[in-house]
Image (cartoon, rainbow, N blue to C red):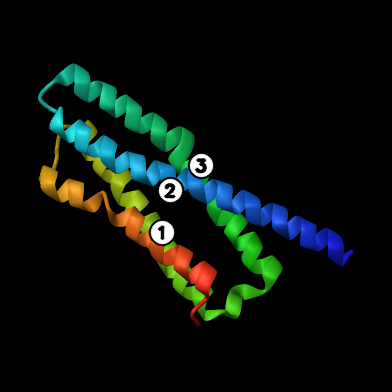
Amino acid sequence: MWERLAVAYLWVKAAHLIFVIFWMAGLFALPRYLVYHQENLSDAADAARWVDRTAKLRRIILTPAMIVTFALGIALASMSGAWSDGWLHAKLLFVLGLAGYHGWAVGYSRKLAAGKPTLSNKTLRALNEVPALGIAVIVVLVIVKPF
């Protein structure tokens, strides 16, 4: 029985990592899409194509991957009994931060779809780096488990 649970744990862990990669790919792509969309707001046809592209990215990759990542992460923490580990609490803080960033990016894409940008191109490009910083900290927390 324990052997089956150990095998199941490894499959859940592998699936979690796969969906984390999908989610991160979307979080790296969406801000770049936002930059291109904002830069092309003056061309109505091109702006419409960016609205369609960002909607598809959100609907097909980004949001489903985040949901599955969360579900599998909860399963992993439950299977391993890691809920009381300090590194997991810190990781969850950063994961929630990335989820908040995800929500912000989706909201900003809707602003752009309405033709109402509120950020400069420079600021938008800087915000493009948030997911990389977040995932770097998360990977260190998971691998090193500093506390």
Can you say which quadrant of the picture contains the N terminus?
Answer: bottom right
Q: CA distance from mark 1 to mark 2?
A: 8 Å
Residue contact between numbered discs 1 and 2, judged by CB atoms under 8 Å: yes
Residue 96 in sight = no
Q: Residue furthest bottom?
A: 147
Q: Quadrant of residue 49?
A: top left
Q: Is residue 116 found left or right of 88 in the rendered image?
A: left
Q: Locate residue 143, reporting x and y percent.
A: 53, 68
Residue highlighted by disc 2: 24
Q: Of label 2 and label 3, which has the lower sequence position?
A: 2
Q: Label 1 is placed on what type of residue?
A: Ile
**According to the image, label 3 marks what residue?**
64
Whole-percent x and y of residue 21?
A: 49, 47
Label drawn at residue 135 = 1
Residue drawn 44% across and 62% down? 95
| Label whose residue precedes the other's in the sequence (1 or 2) | 2
Q: Residue at x 21, y 32 (%)?
A: 37
Label 2 residue SS = helix
Task: Mark 3 and mark 1 in contact? Answer it, CB < 8 Å.
Answer: no
Look at the numbered disc 1 and give the secondary structure of its residue.
Answer: helix
x and y percentages locating residue 94 in the rendered image: 40, 65
Q: Residues within 10 Å of mark 3 (few under 14, many from 20)?
A: some
Q: Marks 2 and 3, how far apart in space?
A: 12 Å
The answer to whether 62 is drawn above or below residue 56 in the figure is: below
Q: Residue 16 appears at what percent x and percent y?
A: 59, 53
Left or right: 14 with respect to 20?
right
